[in-house]
Image (cartoon, rainbow, N blue to C red):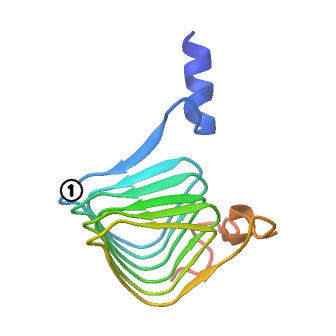
Amino acid sequence: MLKSKQNDEQTGNGGIFNVLAGGTVITGSIVTESDFRLDGRIEGDIHCKGKIVIGPKGCILGNVISENAEVLGSVEGTIRITEKLVLKSTAQVKGDIFIQILEIEPGANFNGGCTMSGKNSTETTDKLLPPRIHPAVGTK
């Protein structure tokens, strides 16, 4: 049983997800293969292969790339979602969005352009994710 739990954690399956708690600020980009919940602040890009939830106090100053997303907080940057984006009534989005399915609740604030692709779109999250870069490369 323990072995299978460890395997689930390594592959991002089994309900395992990342959380950035309120009051936490990260400057830099985040890349994750599992779901991500943001209640803090990120000044940088997020690349998520699963679903990202930006909580009511969550804030991103940067671009978001994910399969699915639910925004209750604020995003200032481009959002690229390969499946479904939900803007809840408390959402504040400033920037362009590229999505397949968009759901906007009354009260949500969205300022930007919107491009919707069809079900036959060949674009996938794997193509949107940047290549893995060794931490020492490009640093001074």
Q: List the single residue furthest toward the front.
A: 106
Image x and y of residue 122, in percent: 82, 69
Q: List the single residue furthest toward the left.
A: 23
Image x and y of residue 110, in percent: 37, 82
Tell me the residue at 27%/64% (across/down): 58
Question: Which amino acid type is marked by label 1?
Answer: Gly
Tell me the residue at 70%/75% (across/down): 117
On screen, residue 123 versus residue 134, left or right, reads right
Tell me the residue at 46%/56% (across/down): 52
Q: Quadrant of residue 66?
A: bottom right
Q: Nearer the viewer, residue 121 or 61?
A: 121
Image x and y of residue 96, in percent: 50, 86
Q: Nearer the viewer, residue 91 or 7?
A: 91
Above or below residue 128? Residue 66 is above
On screen, residue 97 versus residue 94, left or right, reads right
Residue annotated with mark 1: 22
Above or below residue 64? Residue 114 is below
Number of marks in the image? Answer: 1
